[in-house]
Image (cartoon, rainbow, N blue to C red):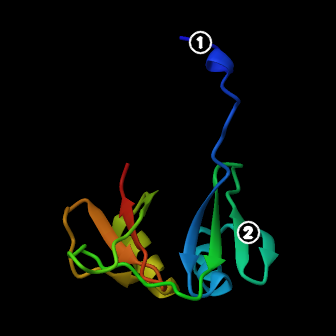
Amino acid sequence: MMGPMMAGRPRISLATVVLDCPDAHALADFYRHLLGWEVKDSEPDWVLLGCPDGGTGLSFQSEPGYQAPVWPERPEEQQKMLHLDFRVDDLDGAEAHAVATGATRAPFQPQKDVRVLLDPAGHPFCLFLP
């Protein structure tokens, strides 16, 4: 195993995951309330939320042509590009909190120990127990 500069490769670290959406500020506000994170930077069409422990942030970018993905995925319809997984200590409590914050429970639930929800822009995300 090579050191941090593995054969001359520069150090690269993930700073944030960016979600496209119709309204960056509205979606950032949803995740701010869901996660309890703070806004670290804000522009008219972009918002960065910072993870309190210094981990990877979550950003939101307004896109005028945004189309919400369909869950579960179906051919010929808008596919999701990614989804977020959140570890929780109380599955029912976390789901209730997410719904009260503005999420919607997805009609299709593929696993008993995971809850799939949709954020206000339609991105699926999962809640799961460790």
Image spot of residue 125 (x, y percent): 40, 68
Residue in the foreground of this view, choosing between 65 and 28 = 65
Query: Please, is residue 89 above or below residue 70 in the view?
Result: above
Image spot of residue 84 (x, y percent): 45, 62
Pointer 1: residues within 10 angstroms few (<14), some, or many (20+)?
A: few
Name the kind of residue labelled 1 in the image.
Answer: Met
Q: Is residue 40 left or right of residue 74?
A: right
Element carrying mark 1? loop
Q: Is residue 129 left or right of residue 64?
A: left
- Residue sticking out furthest to the top: 1
* Residue labelled with disc 1: 2
Q: Is residue 109 left or right of residue 84?
A: left
| Displayed quadrant of residue 34 | bottom right
| Displayed quadrant of residue 128 | bottom left
Name the kind of residue labelled 2 in the image.
Answer: Glu
Image spot of residue 70 (x, y percent): 31, 80
Determine the residue positioned at 53% across, 11% down.
1
